Amino acid sequence: MTGMNAKGLIAQIALGEDSTRQFKAEVKNADSLASEMAAFANTNGGTIFIGVADDASTPGLSGQDVARINQLISNAASQLVRSPLAVQTENVALANGRIVIVLNVPKGIDKPYFDKNGVIWLKAGADKRRVNSKEELRRLFQFTNQFHADELPTKAGIDKLDKLRFRDFLRDVHKKEYPGSPDELTRLLQNMNLATDDGRLNLAGVLLFAEQPEWIVPQFVVKAIRYPGHRIHVTDYLDTEDFSGPLPKLFEGALAFVMRNLHKVQAGRGVNAPGTPEIPEAVFEELLVNALVHRDYLVSAPIRLFVFDNRIEIISPGHLPNNLTVEKIRAGNSNIRNPILVSYVAKGLLPYHGLGSGIKRALEKWPAIDFADDHDGCLFTATVYRKPVEELDLVNMEPEVSLKSSSKTDAASGKRRESVGKASGKILEACRENSSITIPILADFLGITERSVQRNIQNLQRDGLLRRVGGRKEGHWEVIE
């Protein structure tokens, strides 16, 4: 804001109030001004225009007002905000001889900032609000690296530990034997930053080594769905599974789900070779590890994995922390949100190759990846784009079975297909006889690949002849006559 003239001032005022700009026609209360400055400092910084009314008119200030308010600003910033703030002011002259004070409050480097009553304020649009919840306070401390979500205490005692998993980790990584008594085990877990001072597992201990983490933190799972086509359907999907367990098990299950729903291509191999995935497996290794290790565990939500015909989406709770942007992570920058998890993953629990390198490595292997950082929705999405199937040299692909149409009009049902391809007809017949039949069984029955079955099912669903009711495990097929 330095060097602002009247024209630049008017341009800023024309933008209106938001989370970075605030208008005040006059300032008489130093306590109130201190709380406004604390709110800006606790968020992303901003500018207070003093001498500008709420309706964006500019009554301005007299020279006497300017001297008084500048002194008030100095007192508020240095004495009424804890820790003291280093703010900047600039006096801008208006055409009528009046003055507007432009007060610039930087983003704080010593968060959280309190007013004199010990209240923490945050900006909420053009207004400010108190920090009222423990979760919000934890998030504020997390942003300042004074607190991390993986340190959170849980209600799980050390009896919830997966003894075999933890024993193998101690033996393979630390060359230690499993402790012989509960007291020794508790002390060891505390020394390893996996348990709290009162002897309970923290969140990192649960996510890494609990026997069934989903019983303790049921929200931290992976939910995966394979949809036909390019969009989310309410009832139609080809494959779905929820993955739970320790982080290594979540990773293995989610990765297997993606790989079984990808095409296999020849990639220069012989016609009898099994083929390779259309997108390298290492791409999803990097992105899934990133999602599991760097997600925001203060957000009580699962990671979601959506597979469409043209893309795969990995949606993680929590937007990028601190000053990270999509451009920065593409360049290899990173920020440790969960340092305990990172330290253990780096010891071999997941295929981890170093802080900040995962996104770059995924892009090197498959450049067609987009990232979306949604601050309002508190989500981070990695979208991996697939090539059109007609551009792929697929393995063991039968010619696409088309649905031949000779339509007839029916008052109740409208247009329907009169005849279908051989494979599609057999799929409909099998689904009539056994509504719970699975895609692998259909593939064996028809003597074709599971992918061919999926393609024919997509065509049948598209033409309104077949639909899926319910989930993969408990759902069933419904043939529409």
Image (tube, helix red, strand yellow):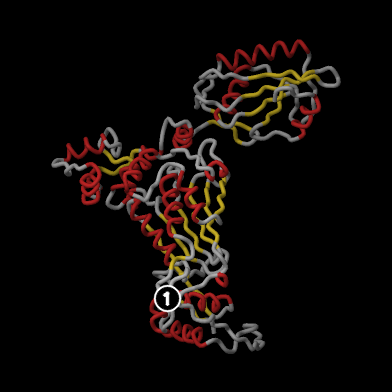
Residue 288, percent across and down?
Answer: 43, 53
Residue 334, percent across and down?
Answer: 48, 40
Pick whichever, 342 or 333, lies toward us: 333
Report which residue position mark 1 lands on.
439
Pick whichever, 434 or 275, lies toward us: 275
Residue 457, percent across and down?
Answer: 50, 77
Residue 370, percent across and down?
Answer: 56, 53
Farthest residue to the left: give it.
Answer: 180
Residue for point 33% across, 41% down: 154
Residue for point 60% across, 16% down: 76
Q: Residues within 10 Å of mark 1 (few under 14, many from 20)?
A: some
Identify whether 75 is placed above or below 439: above
Q: Quadrant of residue 121?
A: top right
In the drawing, does residue 320 fall left or right of residue 252? right
Residue for point 47% across, 83% down: 427
Farthest residue to the right: give it.
Answer: 96
Q: Quadrant of the C terminus?
A: bottom right
| Residue 375 visible, this orientation | no
Identify whether 479 is placed above or below 285: below
